[in-house]
Image (cartoon, rainbow, N blue to C red):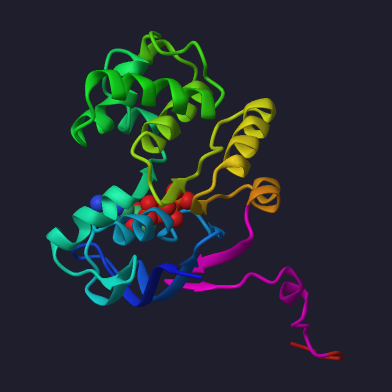
Amino acid sequence: MPRLFEVVDLRFAYPHRPPVLAGARLHLDAGERLAITGPNGAGKSTLLQVLVGLLRPQEGRVVAFGRERRAEADFHEVRRRAGYVFQDPDDQLFCPTVAEDVAFGPLNLGQSRAEALATVERVLAQVGLEGFRDRVTHTLSGGEKRLVSLACVLAMDPDVLLLDEPTNALDEETTDRMVAVLHDLPQAMILVSHDPHFRRKVATRTLRLSRGRLDVPDPACRHAVREPEGRTG
Ligand SMILES: Nc1ncnc2c1ncn2[C@@H]1O[C@H](COP(=O)(O)OP(=O)(O)OP(=O)(O)O)[C@@H](O)[C@H]1O
């Protein structure tokens, strides 16, 4: 199976700050839905931004779609093929109406207005928002905005989806809807999520980011190390 992403020994620190990533490794193969969990501030969003070249690591390698990516120009293709759904939909949606937001990417890729409108209808149906085309974006609920953000990214026909906390602040019903939508999508995904139920339902594999590294979480390990018996302190 083709490997979509592979990162090796990433080190990344914001200026004048201790490293956020320190030896992080991961890979993503076609058909996988990889969940990333980890404490607040561990660097999960930072990692996604490194994958698409919005941040450049100080050390390590980013290989995407079979090629090592270093320079800004290398990442243009990566950002076209890997659709990034931001943690906050208000960072993604900036047009007056849903149709304009969703059509923005396809029009930029050279689709005609008629083609872009057909894309809008197709992806809104994919996320279960038929009839939302002419809605005013800023009047949508938080859950609807999240689904429209996903539709904007799907409109670019990406090979991979990178989703930063896709169920954050969603109620149970909308979370279930998001789960169903993601399940039906053919794309491989990296999903940052704190929600264990969501991860169990959607992810094929989970890694935990902690102290700058990614490891397989093993809840059993938390109980594996015991104080020696009879220890007096
Ligand atoms: N632009 C920045 N400049 C300096 N420090 C930053 C910047 N962006 C993030 N950080 C810091 O880097 C660390 C990692 O942030 P990041 O947002 O990647 O974590 P996260 O795991 O996604 O957190 P959360 O689960 O809370 O969303 C945090 O300590 C954060 O304060």
| Residue 22 percent across, percent down from the top left | 37, 76
Task: Confirm whether residue 217 shows in the render.
Answer: yes
Classify 79 as above or below 97.
below
In depth, the one of 225 and 79 nearer the eye is 79
* The image quadrant in which ligand 1 is located: bottom left
* Residue at figure coordinates x 86%, y 91% from the top left: 230
Q: Is residue 51 left or right of residue 187?
A: left
Task: Confirm whether residue 54 shows in the render.
Answer: no
* Residue at figure coordinates x 37%, y 31% from the top left: 152
| Residue 122 percent across, percent down from the top left | 45, 25
* Residue at figure coordinates x 37%, y 33% from the top left: 155
Q: Is residue 15 left or right of residue 215?
A: left
Classify 116 as above or below 62.
above
Task: Check the picture and name the quadrant holding the C terminus.
Answer: bottom right
Count of numbered marks: 0
Task: Please report the bounds of the magenta region as a residue range.
Answer: 203-228
In depth, the one of 156 and 93 nearer the eye is 156
Q: Is residue 169 left or right of residue 60?
A: right
- Specify the farthest residue to the right: 230
* Residue at figure coordinates x 56%, y 23% from the top left: 128
Residue 9 is inside the magenta segment: no
Residue 224 is inside the magenta segment: yes
| Residue 223 percent across, percent down from the top left | 77, 75
| Residue 198 percent across, percent down from the top left | 66, 45
